[in-house]
């Protein structure tokens, strides 16, 4: 079974700043390197796309340029880079650098900014520019913000969106509702794919996650799902080997074609990457 990790964070503190980690003891110090990730993979992941790691505003382009070197060296298939669609200043120039930096998609973390940011005309116009450039946009909203994700997806119907972390459900708090209805509404948008990632961190481990995975499978289906490790944030829940065990157990319930869709084919289609 081939897996493409579409959500690996690498943290090299000598290259860029990650201020958010100071409030997370398990992530607050030290580097999280590609070698560390490979050790956690244990040979079970065939290829990796780097996901911007919540880099400090001043360093988001610096991070992407550093990661580009790892792509050129063959360590990564590509990167989902940070961007700032809420401002026009420098936005077009940043998109123009995509090919040279191995950028296959973009993300702006939206649970850490005002709710109305994604509703502005400037933001949505620039998201459409990402789509016109042939690249998808990862949506990172908190569960309470899923109606905003729906509005963004509907406002930009020609853009491919990937919803990170199954919509960040509050599993530890028993937050099936209204998450369940909000996810079903998002699933009616054909331009939205969901990422099976991150959820053990919101459960504090592997307990209680089955109803959430089952609902995502039922509403989006394997044809609109991809997989991601969310390493090293996954250390807050099951850690990487444990999440891989859970993933493979979930996929084992599906047919071979469905396994391949979630495991690697959808990622190849959405981000234009290919396993060697």
Image (tube, rainbow, N blue to C red):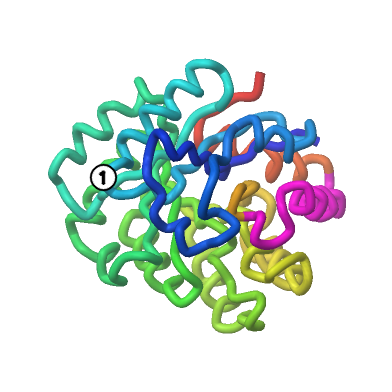
Q: Which residue is mark 1?
A: 58
Q: Position of residue 149 (x, y in %)?
A: 41, 65
Residue 248 at x, y percent in the picture: 81, 48
Label 1 secondary element: helix
Question: Residue at left 50%, top 22%?
Answer: 71
Q: Note whether 185 is above or below 194 in the view shown.
A: below
- The percent coordinates of residue 3 (x first, y second) are 71, 37
Q: Indicate yes or no whether the magenta region holds residue 248.
A: yes
Q: Residue at image x 26%, y 42%?
A: 129
**Residue 45 is drawn in which quadrant?**
top right
Q: Residue at horizontal 48%, vertical 17%?
A: 72
Which residues are the magenta region? 234-255
Q: Is residue 149 above or below residue 233?
A: below
Residue furthest front as drawn: 29
Q: Is residue 156 left or right of residue 42?
A: left
From the viewer's side, name the closer residue of 206 and 154: 206
């Amino acid at each position: 079974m081939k897996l493409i990790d579409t959500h690996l964070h690498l943290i090299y503190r000598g290259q860029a700043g990650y201020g958010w980690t100071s409030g997370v003891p398990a992530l607050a110090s030290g580097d999280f390197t590609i070698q560390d990730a490979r050790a956690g993979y244990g040979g079970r992941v065939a290829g990796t796309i780097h996901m911007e790691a919540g880099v400090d505003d001043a360093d988001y382009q610096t991070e992407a340029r550093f990661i580009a070197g790892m792509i050129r060296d063959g360590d990564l298939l590509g990167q989902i880079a940070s961007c700032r669609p809420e401002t026009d200043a420098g936005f077009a120039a940043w998109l123009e650098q995509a090919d040279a930096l191995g950028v296959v998609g973009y993300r702006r973390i939206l649970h850490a900014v005002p709710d109305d940011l994604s509703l502005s005309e400037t933001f949505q116009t620039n998201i459409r520019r990402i789509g016109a450039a042939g690249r998808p946009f990862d949506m990172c909203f908190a569960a309470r913000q899923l109606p905003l994700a729906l509005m963004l997806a509907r406002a930009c119907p020609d853009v491919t969106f990937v919803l990170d972390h199954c919509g960040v459900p509050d599993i530890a708090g028993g937050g099936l509702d209204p998450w369940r209805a909000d996810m079903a509404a998002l699933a009616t948008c054909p331009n939205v794919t969901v990422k099976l990632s991150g959820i053990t961190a919101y459960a504090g481990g592997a307990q209680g996650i089955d109803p959430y995975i089952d609902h995502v499978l039922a509403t989006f289906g394997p044809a609109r799902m991809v997989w991601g490790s969310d390493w090293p944030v996954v250390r807050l829940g099951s850690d990487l080997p444990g999440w891989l065990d859970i993933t493979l157990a979930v996929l084992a319930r599906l047919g071979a074609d469905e396994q391949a869709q979630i495991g690697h084919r959808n990622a190849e289609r959405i981000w234009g990457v290919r396993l060697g």
